[in-house]
Image (cartoon, rainbow, N blue to C red):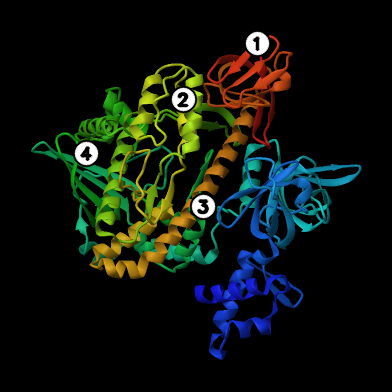
Amino acid sequence: MEKWIKRILFSLEKAGKKGMSLNKLQKKCKVQKGDLKKFQAALNRCMEDGSVAESGDRYLAVRSLGLQPAVIERLHKTYGFAALPDGQEVFVLGSRLKGALPGDKVLLKLSAHPRGSLPEGEVSRIVETGDNEYPGVLETGPEGSFFLPDTLGGFPLRVLGTKCGAENGDKVTARIIRRGDSHRDHLAEITACFGSAEHASACAEAVLAAAGISAAFPAAVLDEARFLEHRGIPERELSERLDLRDQPIFTIDGADSKDLDDAVSLEKSGGFYRLGVHIADVSHYVRPKSLLDEEAFRRGTSIYYADRVIPMLPEALSNGICSLNPGEDRLTFSALMTLSPEGELLDFSFRKSVIRSRVKGVYSEVNALLDGSASEALREKYREVLPALPLMKELKDLRLSLRRKRGAPALESAESKLVLDARGRTADVLPRTAGEAESIIEEFMLLANQSAASLARNLEMPFVYRVHEHPAPDRVDALRETLQKLGLPAGSLPEKPAPRDLAGILDGVRGKPLAPVVNRLVLRAMAKARYSPFPLGHFGLALEDYAHFTSPIRRYPDLAIHRILSSWAEGDSVRELAKRYQRFSARAAEQSSAAEVQAMEIERGCEDCYKAEFMKGHIGEEYDGVISSVTSFGIYVELPSTVEGLVRVENLPDGEYFFDGLLELSDIHSGRKFRLGDPVRVRCVRADVNAGNVDFELA
């Protein structure tokens, strides 16, 4: 394929703006009769990636036209952004977009004199239009029906055809069915209705639908899952595994969790800890090239928001045969680790196993058992595993101490807990708290993940690593400048900081009013974690080796490395593994990273809608908060509940405000300042459920 692509591009670039007919191009590329299929596939690939354009009966190399292939990424009211093949973003004014929409493949003419820091361009031609659905709100009135998209710059689009029973103010999805020369001229068709845009659940469903995500699985995929569940576990399979059913193994998870994919066990002998992390053997059921595998690969991850789960695998597996339910035989992949009296990891092995969980542990219950507040009934429920709990806390404390010693930054992010009523509406928003049990599971899973990655790197087998690279120099510079303006000692922060440099900054503000703000600043300065076929290390954990091994029910990368490690455990050589899994690991890493980003955006967007729904019932009420972000158009204030809202600059006390570009809005006349981290008292004045936005004003 690559050989033919090079020939095609070389020939067309040499032909310049005249291009070539198909017949002449074949001759120039010396295509023989047996090469036709390969040549045509290569030409199609060039057309798809935008490096070759078709004009009439001639083909032209886009580069010879002075154009660049690109994909429109996102739009705002008066401008948009396109992405070049190398990932570089290009700024495009709205008047130069020619009506292009996100997902459209275009040819860009780059400006010789960009006005900002980004390259600037103009859409020369739309090569291929995306067939996307967009979430928004239907508005009907005397002048007709209009679709107000959540994205696409927010231009109202006239609606043609049936409205699927949607009424004014309903949350809907729509497709662009007729293109105009500008965004205002496009015509839309409503594709689905989800109910009132005043309800967060309707807004969330529309966002999922527009992203092509459904809780429902294809019938054939469900049939595969049901067959595996009903087949159960053959006796032959049990006899070939390490039998751990007599061990005091158990799960610890949230009270409402049904997809239990990790269980733990711990004993201490001669001062040494023997830790077992037993993970559902999903790869035993989800085989390569099966319909289940194809669907799981496409989804990439489960999505969690409010009280909903959009699972990666059907319920027959995720809550059934793969879930480590108490009192039931379950196939597992066990990481068996030995740790020193000081908590150092000394040795590990990975074995296919069978377990029978003793109890479905719940975080809150285990926390009560550890702090001594548990009832006798609760102690009886955990009777078989009770001796392990103080040992687990002991080992967890040692591991946390070692984590601090190696300099891993102890970031504290404010996560939200949404409380819904019987109608599915938001009754309360609370900060999510973590106790000893949550910390125990986090540390034990981290150990298993580290061991899996260490094994793969040492043996140089193909793998999917969880990587977190060093912060980019420009982000470090911005962090240093912001911290110094906050009066914090950050002048010695090097251009390429080590994890312990950032850990020192966080430790310096721990327990102080500025701590949440500094946590957020450090987090923003860091690179985004992703999946990679290469062991690039994990900056945030200060680890050379890291992967995701412990959640194969919920994440595809975990399932992918289970598959690779299973082949290794069955005796395949590293050479055989490379032949079978090299391309697979790269594809899995790329797809899993993209799916994770999409899932995080959806979860965050849905959560914002639920928070706005809650605040809609509290208009006029006053709250104490902290300035969490400062912009040229206002200040964002975060409440102790984790709800964040905007105080618009026009709602600040009269004045002429100047934004310093980092952390402060100040009135150039009175000198009054609004600074990152300052405490303020605000009043809720507006909540837009559909947009997930909350507006405050100073009280």
The kind of residue on which mark 4 rests is: Glu
Residue shown at the point (49%, 57%) measured from the top left: 591
Image coords of residue 304 (percent x, y): 50, 43
Q: Name the residue under label 1.
A: 671
- Looking at the rendered structure, the number of numbered marks drawn on it comes to 4
Q: Mark 2 points at which residue?
A: 518
The kind of residue on which mark 2 rests is: Val
Alpha-carbon span between mark 1 and mark 3: 46 Å
Task: Name the N-terminal-most of marks 1 and 2.
Answer: 2
Image coords of residue 364 (percent x, y): 36, 30
The kind of residue on which mark 3 rests is: Ala
Q: Name the residue under label 4.
A: 384
Residue 154 visible in the displayed image: yes
**Residue 126 vs residue 51, the one in the foreground:** 51
Alpha-carbon span between mark 4 and mark 1: 66 Å
Mark 2, Cα crowd under 10 Å, few <14 / some 14-19 / many 20+, is many
Q: Residue placed farthest to the bottom in the image? A: 33
Please identify, in this view, whether the residue under mark 1 or under mark 2 is nearer the observer: 1
